[in-house]
Amino acid sequence: MKKSLQVTEPGSDSDGIDQVHDQRIVIPTKFVSIADSLEKREHSRFLTSQIPTDLSIQVQETTFNVHKYPLVSKCGYIGRLELQPSISNYGYDLKLENFPGGSETFEIILKFCYGLPVDLNPNNIALLRCASEFLEMTEEFEDGNLITKSEAFLTFVVLCSWKDTITVLKSCEALFPWAENLQIVRRCCDSLAWKASRKNSSTGDAVHEEGWWFDDIATLRIDHFRRIITAIRAKGITPEIIGKCIVHYAERWLPGMDMEIEGVRGYGHGKNELQFSICSQKEEGGIAHSKEQKAIIESLISMLPPQQEAVSCKFLLQMLKMAIVYSATPALISELEKRVGMMLEDASVNDLLIPSYKNFDQGKLTNSPERCTMHDIDVVQRIVEYFLMHEQQQQQQQQKSGKCNISKLLDNYLAEIARDPNLSVTKFQVLAESLPENVRTCHDGLYRAIDTYLKTNRSLPEHDRRRLCKIMNCEKLSLDACMHAAQNDRLPLRTIVQVLLSEQLKMREEMLDKNGNTSEPEGNQSSTNMEIKTMKAELENMKTKMEALQSDYSGLQKEYGKLSNKPKNALGWALSWRKIRNSFHAKLDGDETGDGQQRPNPARKRSSKRRSSIS
């Protein structure tokens, strides 16, 4: 909706009286004739008339050569000034510093002062309102002055329309602090919040569904967006809707937020490509762009509703990555980590793969493996600690625990980061042991992660291998995992022996479960008990033999160390290792057959067949 200011001369049918509908004003006849046209030249504006101008006004880089009387009669600011005589031929000089809206807005003000038609519309109303306040165009100097007209248009026309209010609010971005002091921003934000909070809200004839206002709000600057969200929250909008609006805004203003990190696929190339992507995003707009992005991230984090159902865990982790990239306030990063910890069971492995942005930003990539890891392990460590603290509080309140899901998630995460050749044993061990022992009911996932780490770090010393394998409980491995581990050359000998013992136990228990029956006669029950006692004795005997075998293995290692300076025969060493393992299997089978003459056991026959097939 547009309104024009029409100019009439004295003696016309209107008699120079202002009326509400056509908004007419009266100015002296001689200035009506001089203001017929405004000639534009480079960096200056000249009024083409027969009466010479007597005032030169500079606004920004543009100079306006005008008549003093029309401006003084409506602008209190210019009337109060002690004008300095001009060194040129224009009478007086005046320079308006920090004029709201610049030269284009001042040109519209000139037209209004000279009585030329002026269109008030959503694009210029905030500019004219602030400029008229700057020039003190009040009713004291003339009835129906520009302050009154612009204020009426803003209140009765703009604020009644959703789209016009959005337009005015955008134009206020360049009018600080005038738009704030005149309450234009506050009134626009309150109007938008009221319209957005209405049920079955509509703009025009069409009725929109929930969230119809997200797109328009997302185009606003972050400080205006924050004020609208605050006003909407005060009107009782649910946290879920506010969370969706924040997510929508983040997707628009943070383009790098949805970047997925699919693990360490091809470590060297992948890392360089990722770091280049991060660097290019930060340097694309320079320092100013980085500061703007940081301000957006910090504002969005502080706006998040406290309810867990407001936003997803995936979004929180995306915001956490962006907060780390742009070095957000540590308190906000810590708050995000706590919130992620409370919802960790809803996360996925890819969400937890947070690259170590700080290594690239600091430009101090030292030779220390602790500082060159592909992923930020410390962040995940803190998140797991927050999760355990939250779970402890949940248990005190006798609520459902999600530790079982977390054990699988953490084991899969360990398997992903185990591909990083710069990941230290200490960090891997600390993260693996962060969960209590009773949380993992099965250690298959942990075994897969350890095996991946050993496969990546093939030159790992023997004591570090034993240190890693101590994390794993062989008794909690499935039968398939035991069979795989029994022939895994990367595991230490002690672990292999433990796995073999565990495999035997599981096979025996499986056979007992198949053959056993709760309604067996007492004779069969006593026979089963005897077998269990015999098995325990065999286990003790096996442990003794294991210690002897480990002593032999240590001797072989020493001999191998002495021969390390000589040309090595890798095939011969592999054959020697197989002979050791075969001799160990032969001892086991010999013990079993020796006992089997007195007490046949189908479970041991099955174990021997499986081991022979594996070999």
Image: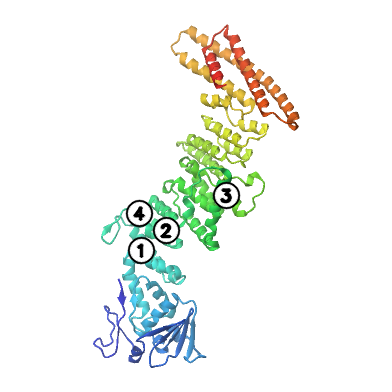
Residue identifier under label 4: 211
Tell me the quadrant of the picture where the N terminus can be found: bottom left
- For the residue carrying disc 3, how many other residues have a C-alpha within 10 Å: few (<14), some (14-19), or many (20+)? few
Judged by depth in the image, the label closer to the viewer, 4 or 1, is: 4
Residue identifier under label 2: 230
Residue identifier under label 1: 191
> Which of the 4 image quadrants contains residue 6?
bottom left
Residue 158: x percent and y percent?
A: 33, 69
Judged by depth in the image, the label closer to the viewer, 3 or 1, is: 3
Q: Are marks 4 and 1 in contact (CB under 8 Å)?
A: no
Residue located at (31% from left, 80% from top): 5
- For the residue carrying disc 4, how many other residues have a C-alpha within 10 Å: few (<14), some (14-19), or many (20+)? some
Left or right of residue 352, residue 4 in this image: left
Amino acid type, mark 4: Gly
Amino acid type, mark 2: Thr
Amino acid type, mark 1: Ser
Residue identifier under label 3: 272
> Which of the 4 image quadrants contains residue 203?
bottom left
Residue 226: x percent and y percent?
A: 44, 59
Figure disc tally: 4
Q: Earlier in the sequence, mark 4 or mark 1?
A: 1
Q: Depth check: give the residue in front, 25 or 318.
A: 318
Task: Tell me the element at label 4.
Answer: loop
Residue situated furthest left in the rendering: 13
> Which of the 4 image quadrants contains residue 416?
top right
